[in-house]
Amino acid sequence: MAPLSAKKPPRNILDIATGVGDWAIQMGDLFPDSTPKDVPPNVYFYVEDSSDNWMFPQKFDYIHTRNTAGCWSAFETQIAEQAFAAL
């Protein structure tokens, strides 16, 4: 939902429920200064349960999820609150 701009590109991006990783790889190609070649070196895959407490040491400039309706029992408290706190 948030606009992306080449004028101020995001550097730390989190994709929740990434699936096979296509979107994350495309973002790495589009914004090479954000920390992504096949899997660009600035793309990392973590196998986590997104409804657990997030323990990322860094903040994110952009957080993405899509096609995840019904994935969580309480989206607002399990995901949205943590996402806003991680920005």
Image (cartoon, rainbow, N blue to C red):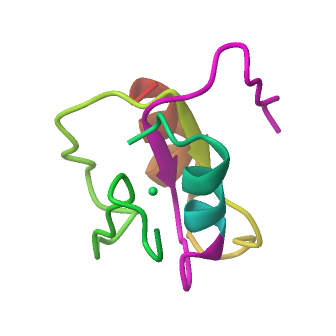
Q: Looking at the image, which is closer to me, 60 or 30? A: 30
Q: Is residue 82 left or right of residue 21?
A: left
The residue lying at 54 percent from left, 72 percent from top is 18
Is 4 situated left or right of 20 in this image? right
- Whole-percent x, y for residue 83 in the image: 49, 38
| Lateral position of residue 37 relative to residue 62, left or right | left
Task: Assess whether residue 12 is covered by the magenta stretch.
Answer: yes
User: In which quadrant is the N terminus drawn?
Assistant: top right
Nearer to me, 9 or 70: 9
Looking at the rendering, the stretch of residues picked out in magenta corresponds to 1-22
Mark count:
0
Is residue 7 found left or right of 43 in the rendered image? right
Q: Is residue 60 magenta?
A: no
Residue at 26%, 51% in the rendered image: 53
Measured along the vertical axis of the image, is residue 64 above or below residue 72? above
Task: Tell me where residue 48 appears, x and y as whole percent.
Answer: 29, 71
| Residue 71: % across, % down | 61, 76
Instruction: Give the dominant element type of the magenta stretch: helix, strand or loop.
Output: loop
Residue at (56% x, 70% y) in the render: 72
Q: Nearer the viewer, residue 84 or 23?
A: 23
Looking at the picture, how far across and down is residue 7, in whole percent?
72, 14
